[in-house]
Amino acid sequence: MTKAAENNVDLFDVAVKNLHDLLTAQGVSAEPPELIGVGGYSELYASLLEVRTAIMAFASGNLNYKVTAKGYMPGAIKALQASLNHLTWQTKMVSSGDFTQRVDFMGDFSESFNMMVKQLEKSRNELEGMNRQLLENNIKLQQQADAIRESEERLRHIAENVSDVIWTLDRSMEHFTYISPSIAGLRGLSVAEALQEPIEQAMTPESLATLRKALSNEIVNAQNHHVADSQPEVIEIEQVCQDGRVINVEVVISAITDSDGKIKEFVGVSRDITVRKKTEGLLKFQSTHDSLTGLYNRAFFDAELELAARGRQFPVSIIVADLDGLKQVNDTLGHGAGDQVIKGAATILQMVFRGNDIVARTGGDEFVVLLREMDYEEAVIAIERIRSCVEIYNANNGEPSVRISLGGATAATGEKIPETLKKADELMYADKILRKQQAPVTL
Amino acid sequence: MNSDRKYKFSWSLLGDIEAGRPNLGNTTRLEVYRLLQFAFRDVIEQHVGTEETDKIFYESGALAGKEFYEHMLTPTTDLNEFVRELQEVLKELGIGILRVEKADLEKGEITVTVSEDLDCSGLPELDYEICSYDEGFISSLLECFSGMKFIVKEVDCWCTGDRTCRFEAKAVV
Ligand SMILES: [Zn+2]
């Protein structure tokens, strides 16, 4: 071999080692010192070095490395760089919510990536759906809350503007949780005072017992039935006002229950029925009493007679009393005087009898007394007492004097009562005849 | 410039292809397109020189891009929307596969690649980038979308041995 040929072989060896190093060695020099200036070798070396550096840069994640070399191999690396950069951009787009991004031309990865994006989109749609649902629910709840608030306002407005007192009582039955302002009209208390007042002071002990019984009934009702078909309890109680007056109050009570039927609280409406009670009492009195004398009337006497007949308080005595000469008094002195005589007779009978004795005016000039557990002897004594009371009365009251014919009889059993009444009546007539003979009426 | 021009472009010049080609349809061989382009390039270069030729192609691309934007794309202000539709249309029409490497509208920097490019993919290796028409085309699309003027430069091209054409766009401030 010539010297030049030997030299070429050496250079070739160096070049091979150079290129081998570029491919395999960890560290390489920036330039091939021995071969600088050898026809195009430096440029080749530089290009390969750049490819090597670029591959290393991409492998370690630096996708921005700028490859300036041209040609097939640098081109292939740049194609990979372009794909990875595009992928980075696509991922950014996906993360900003663009689920239309699809990867193609990257083999199996494309399929996995696209599937992931589709799944993400599906999940987001589901989440959005849930979110919408939540939002709708929220709006519905808000509307319901508004409706409840409106209804509450309406109810409050009603509660605060009716004369009836509306209240709520907690389920311990001890504490009022709400009392409407009309409590001032009912009992003369402010709402705050009424709320602080112990329930025992709000009503009479009997009334409190009545109230507690009614509340307990409501609890039982609520447990046994549906709320819808449980009837409110209506009771009447007596309450003491701030000024000491006792008033009659009608209370309507309902239990408020939760969905399980458990009592949450009670709601009640209290109404002043004092006037009604008085009217009722008056009507009852008028239906059973004679308006002129205040004695029982015929209807009441008949009912009592029937009760006595069916009862057990024997013997039962009946005394019939009949005014003498009432017609004459009316005709000559006028009805005012006649009424005075009738009232006088009533006064006399009330002087003699009291308590459970039934003293009734059964006709214009006729009175009957029903005496339970009184035997004939006692009845006779009673008749005598009437006579002496008549004398005393007349002595004190002057004309027109009261004159009464009397007859009494006694029944040992209920069956005997009609005939006993008849007998007393007959005896009274007999007395009247006798009295006419002894002392004819003169005015 | 002369106001009564003979060749002023209008979209209608593209004709009614459906009516005009009932049998052959709307496609032709890509060679025909390239034949036309490279023939133009040759003759124009002979007349005005290389630099002017590149400029003419860039401007033609820009004109085409503007018309293309107006007739083929839906106006939007959303970059993602714009890119997605552009990708779709370019692929559908067989122009190329567009990918975004970097898009920073605030900085006015956008890097895209076009693979299987209509103009250059498969061309023999030359030592210069050849897609000046594409550069103009892309600059116009970006301008129509963003309202900013862009200068687009092809930095990698099939013709220089790369597998994709890479275009760097920079907004002109
Ligand atoms: Zn190109």
Image (cartoon, rainbow, N blue to C red):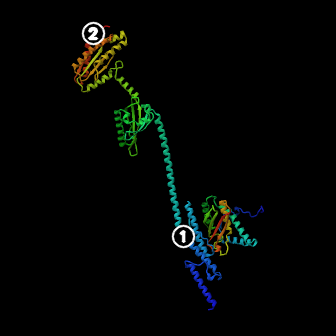
Q: How far apart are marks 2 and 1 (CA)?
A: 144 Å
Question: Picture quarter containing residue B157?
Answer: bottom right
Q: Which SS class for mark 1?
A: helix
Residue A185: horizontal and vertical position, in percent? 44, 31
Q: Do the residues marked 2 and 1 share a common chain?
A: yes
Q: What residue type is labelled 1?
A: Gly
Residue A436's disc number = 2
The quarter of the rendered structure image containing the N terminus of chain A is bottom right
Task: Name the quarter where the C terminus of chain A is drawn.
Answer: top left
Q: Which of marks 2 and 1 is in front?
A: 1
- Ligand 1 falls in quadrant: bottom right
In this view of the protein, which residue sits in the foreground, A95 or A178?
A: A178
Q: Give the chain of mark 2.
A: A
Whether residue A394 is situated above or below residue B26 in the rendered picture: above
2 or 1: tag closer to the N-terminus: 1
Q: Is A133 above or below relative to A104? A: above
Image position, residue A153 (x, y; %): 48, 39
Dot 2 surroundings within 10 Å: few (below 14), some, or many (20 or more)? few
Q: Position of residue B103 (x, y in %)?
A: 61, 64
In the foreground, B40 or A280: A280
Amino acid beneath label 2: Lys
Q: Does the residue labelled 2 lie within 8 Å of ligand 1?
A: no
Q: In which quarter of the image is residue A242?
A: top left
Crowd class of label 1 (few under 14; some 14 to 19; many from 20; radius 10 Å)? few
Kindly identify which numbered label has been placed on residue A107: 1
Kindly check if marks 2 and 1 are in contact, taking CB atoms under 8 A apart as contact.
no
Q: Does the residue labelled 1 lie within 8 Å of ligand 1?
A: no
Q: What element carries label 2?
A: helix
> As displayed, is residue A12 above or below residue B147?
below
Is residue A426 in view? no
Residue A176 is situated, as x and y percent measured from the top left of the image, at 40, 38
